[in-house]
Image (cartoon, grey):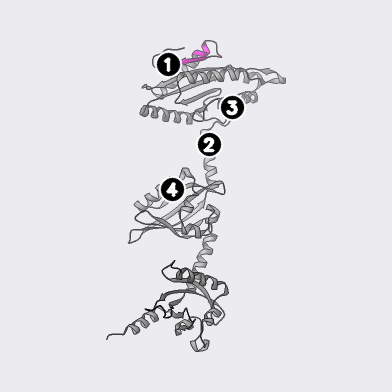
Amino acid sequence: MQLSPETRLKAILDGTGAGTWEWNLDTNDVIFNERWAGMLGYTLDELAPVTFGTWERLCHPADLALAWKALKKYLDGKGPQFECVIRMRHKNGDWRYIHTRGMLLHGTHTDQPRWLMGTHLDVTEEKVTEHRLSQLAESLPGLIYTFVMEPDGGYYFTYMSRKVEDFFGITPEEACSDAELLFQHIHPEDREAVHDSIADSFSTLEQWECDYRVINSGMTGWLRGVAKPEQEPDGKVVWQGMVMNIDDEKRLELELERLSVTDELTGLFNRRYFLRKLEETAAQQDRYGGEFSLVAVDLDHFKAINDAYGHPVGDAVLKRFGELIQRRVRKSDVVARTGGEEFLILMPQTSLENAAQVAEDLRRAIENESFVGDESQDFRVTLSAGVVSCMDEVVTVRDLLSICDRSLYRAKRQGRNRIMVQYPLSGRQA
């Protein structure tokens, strides 16, 4: 049996449960089908006479402006169709969410009336579910999102919970309209790592996890993102994920890390950290060449200071000396307290002569410092130091430290309060 186009169209519309409407933009005449009235609990007879004013009367006042704005956007050619979601009053007094779509039907002659034709679908249940999910998302400790990456590398958000405002300082609407607005808030030093981790998850389809810093209102905080990817038939990958604030966890982690590499009394690095950095510096020299220097420092007669004035005074001397060193070295230098009164300084990209000058400056600085002992008695402290450099020479870290120590002990044997410079492999001293 061959069905007419009209019969087929009616069957399709009946199957979708959609109400239909037709609106003459020039005369304001309207035509609605029975299903349109039924989704609001009425029959067309109950609403008769059905006019454009009937639709306006049933529409929520706050949504009329939204509908007019959407219509203007469509008529101005800024969209493929007229589309918006509005609330309409049901016969029982409830507000129903109605998704309306329509398109303009042009006649063949310019003097023919313009008809806008479309459908109404009741999406109340979807809206209620969406609202409940939104409430659930707001009750969670982090923000919930859906992120999509296309095969060509393009990406965007299709959903973002309200907590994005707390974490990134932008609205969900802004994040979904332009993903770059969110990524711009990621700390510049972390941005590349975040993008690389997303690319890895895209190619491997393994869970994405990344800790990174964000800048929001001038403040820097730590976030952790976790998301599970799923690849769709067209090749794009969709992540459903959560981002959580981990400021407290990171602060604790960084503090524990700091304590693990720091001398508690002076705030300088400890021996373990120093040796690690020395190994790294030596490895870089092996690969790229260059020169670095070591300075070994020992405070003279420090045991006598502890015996004469007590350990609190001795501790004060060590702390003061640590401050003196920090003021005289570069940020790239590594300073460690490696024993009671023993210190090591690693100076990357530094010649033997320059390192020796730093050591001499330290010797003079501590010599000119005045410390207070018992009964306000002042006393002075001196130091001995050994300096060694390594430049394109095959020498182990252990050997280098040993050479530096020998130079230091030679300074002590020759009367203390002096600097001895050791040329590592030739054995030449000055």
In terms of secondary structure, where does tag 2 sit? helix
For the residues labelled 4 and 2, the Cα–Cα distance comes to 25 Å
Q: Residues within 10 Å of mark 2 (few under 14, many from 20)?
A: some
The residue located at (72%, 20%) in the rendering is: 375
Q: Is residue 188 depicted above or below 36 in this figure?
A: above
For the residues labelled 3 and 4, the Cα–Cα distance comes to 38 Å
- Among all residues in the image, which is located at the extreme bottom? 45
Instruction: Determine if the magenta segment contains residue 352.
Output: no
In terms of secondary structure, where does tag 4 sit? helix
Q: Which mark is residue 323?
A: 3
- N-terminal-most mark, 1 or 2: 2
Residue 281: horizontal and vertical position, in percent? Answer: 42, 29
Mark 1 and mark 4 in contact? Answer it, CB < 8 Å. Answer: no
Q: Which residue is mark 2?
A: 258
The disc labelled 4 sits on which kind of residue? Val
Q: Which residue is mark 1?
A: 423
Image quadrant assignment for residue 2: bottom left
- N-terminal-most mark, 1 or 4: 4
For the residues labelled 1 and 3, the Cα–Cα distance comes to 28 Å
Q: Is residue 178 left or right of residue 199?
A: right
Mark 3 and mark 4 in contact? Answer it, CB < 8 Å. Answer: no
The disc labelled 3 sits on which kind of residue? Glu
Q: Is residue 46 left or right of residue 206?
A: right
- Among all residues in the image, which is located at the extreme right? 375
The residue located at (35%, 61%) in the rendering is: 232
Q: Which residue is mark 4?
A: 194
Quadrant of the drawing holding the N terminus: bottom left
The prevailing secondary structure element of the residues shown in magenta is: loop
Tag nearer the camera, 4 or 2:
4
For the residues labelled 1 and 2, the Cα–Cα distance comes to 34 Å
